[in-house]
Image (spheres, helix red, strand yellow):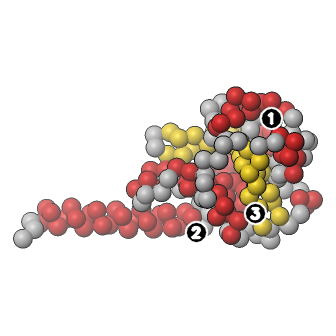
Amino acid sequence: MPTLNQLIRRSSTIVKRCVYGFILALGLGYGLPVTHSIAQAVGITEYQVKAAFIYNFVAFTQWPDTTGQTLHLCVYGEDYFGSEIDKLQSKPLDKRAIKIVRINDPEKLAGCQVVFFSKSVGSSLSNLLSNLPAQPILTLADSPDAIAQGVIINMNLVNEKIVFEINLEIARKSGLDISSKLLQLAVKVYQ
């Protein structure tokens, strides 16, 4: 027969799992970023969470009307997402569709509206960014010092949480408008 303390501990664990599950479902369902520690509690990998963040970055960014009905989200370099990033193609995004494209040719970056630069290309990141055409392209990364190299949004893993920083000056120069809601959630915004 379990003691009162054992019953309290068991119910506490069940409640925690329910709360984590609810927060995760709420975050993914309403387009709010989810932290890595919550995701880890329910068995989600780092890149599943990063894919959810990327969806939110795209959803809270406004492009000029000239970008068309499909946003090409390109993954440049080694793909750590696997099939997780492909799931974004089935998620609704206002009146636009997302198409995932994996590329390794820098010449093809001009056809992208969103580019995620894998950490595998971190050493050549500034060169890749300087060769991008002067178009509204949302650049994303998860590499140390990516913001300093010219990426618009960079994700980092800090204390088991995924946090992000935004270079608003570069976003504006690119003709992109980032929602104030997203700016409030960033750990740092560079003007």
Q: Nearer the viewer, residue 96 or 175?
A: 96
Can see residue 120?
yes
For disc 2, the marked residue is 29
149 above or below 181?
Answer: above
Q: Is residue 160 left or right of residue 5?
A: right
In contact (CB < 8 Å): disc 1 and disc 2: no
The residue beneath circle 3 is 98
Q: Residue 27: which quarter of the image?
A: bottom right
**Label 1, label 2: how far apart the Cα atoms are:** 34 Å
Q: Dot 2 surroundings within 10 Å: few (below 14), some, or many (20 or more)?
A: few
Q: Is residue 146 visible?
A: no
User: Element type at marker 2?
Assistant: helix
State which quarter of the image contains the N terminus. bottom left
Question: What residue is at 76 percent from the left and 61 percent from the top?
Answer: 99
Q: Mark 1 = which residue?
A: 128
The label shown at residue 40 is none
Neighbours of disc 1 within 10 Å: few (<14), some (14-19), many (20+): some
**Amino acid under disc 3:** Ile
Of marks 1 and 2, which one's residue comes earlier in the chain? 2
Q: CA distance from mark 3 to mark 1?
A: 23 Å
The disc, 2 or 3, on the residue closer to the chain's N-terminal end is 2
